[in-house]
Amino acid sequence: MGNGLHDTVLGVGMVDLKFTSGKIVQLKNVLHKPGGSPLARVCQVLVAATRNFNKDLPCDSTALYEFLGQGSAIQGSRKLEHTDGLNFFDRAAIVTPSGCESPRQLSSWEICTVTQVEELKILIRMLPIWSTVILYSAVQEHMFSTFIEQGMVMEKHVGSFEIPAASFQSVQVITVLLLIPFYGRVLVAVFRNFTGRTNDIFFDTPVERLGLGLFLSMLSMMSAAVVESNRLRIAQDKGLVHRQVAVPMSILWQGPQYMMLGAGEVFTNIGLSEFFYSESPDSMRSLRMAFYFANIATGNYLNSFILSLVPVFTARGDIPGWIPGNLNEGHLDRFYLMMAGLSFLNLLAFIFCATRYTNVKRLHI
């Protein structure tokens, strides 16, 4: 797995591809034999560990059961080194006296290999980092909702050309399309000449890229709050508060918030995909896309939940709340500031989880 946006290895079907300086190069044809259901193996560890709940763990982890061959007992997976922590699941690999002679003859629901146990540990350790990216997905959804509503009450004409509010999100798409090749072909090449480094010039791990993406999404909410605050001030000065009309403030001021969301998407989505690919067990890499789309779906539900709570807590009597039908009467800026504050707290939680994350240790046999 590469260490940068310019050097990323992705498994696509039966081919390994490498993204190098803006080019995708096929490395080799690979064939991974089916290794069984990952969910079934997770359930087997849970059942076996529960069965051995009252048994003591051996002081030496080498006494736990592991396949004796060079490869792993799981098709398409390398052996994983035993790690400390989450010791309850190690009970699934306890060799009981009745199974000392030939543990391989026992059912996988009775005894599991250390590699199988470590697969579950890896998934559990990845969950905190995965969960901190949910709020990012919720912030991304505002590009399709409140950003458009904000743009609809701004001046959409640039000269004789009218920019539809919903079409202005193309700024985010353009940012993504320009940033990836600019980073890979220009910044990396320039800094490589000065520093001589061949790996990523700014980041050593996918987790660091994730952190930058979360930070940029927070800045996007802050930018949107500043724009909305100025828009409401102009509406107040022009006497347009109680009129559901556009305010004479150009929609181009929304550009920075869209661009920061685009930049955040580059670093977060690539970092998240690379994190899942590099840290997932070999036989569970197919789950990375499931985790990715589950993150987006959960973020959508979270965003809908937050939006549903806003009128409950902000609308009182004649007070229309933060996001009324007429945005000139509301305080969408306060909502954006709240999302920026939540993003900041989420970033702190991400840093806490990232600094305590244990990387996967594979045995190269």
Image (cartoon, rainbow, N blue to C red):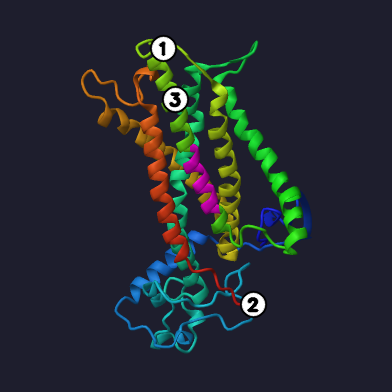
Specify the amino acid type for callout 1: Lys
Cα–Cα gap, marks 2 and 1: 70 Å
What is the x, y in percent for residue 345? 38, 49
Q: Residue at x 76, y 49 (%)?
A: 185
- Is 299 left, or right, of 53 in this rendering? right
- Camera-nearest residue between 154 and 289: 154
The disc at residue 87 is none
Q: Is residue 217 magenta?
A: yes
What is the x, y in percent for residue 44? 44, 67
Specify the amino acid type for callout 3: Asn
Cα–Cα gap, marks 2 and 3: 59 Å
**Vertical position of residue 309 compared to residue 103: above or below:** above
Q: Residue at x 70, y 62 (%)?
A: 199
First reached walking from the N terminus: tag 2 or tag 1: 1
Q: Secondary structure at mark 3?
A: helix
- Which residue position holds label 3? 230
First reached walking from the N terminus: tag 2 or tag 3: 3
- Which residue position holds label 2? 364
Circle count? 3
Cα–Cα gap, marks 3 and 1: 12 Å
Q: Secondary structure at mark 1?
A: loop
Specify the amino acid type for callout 2: His
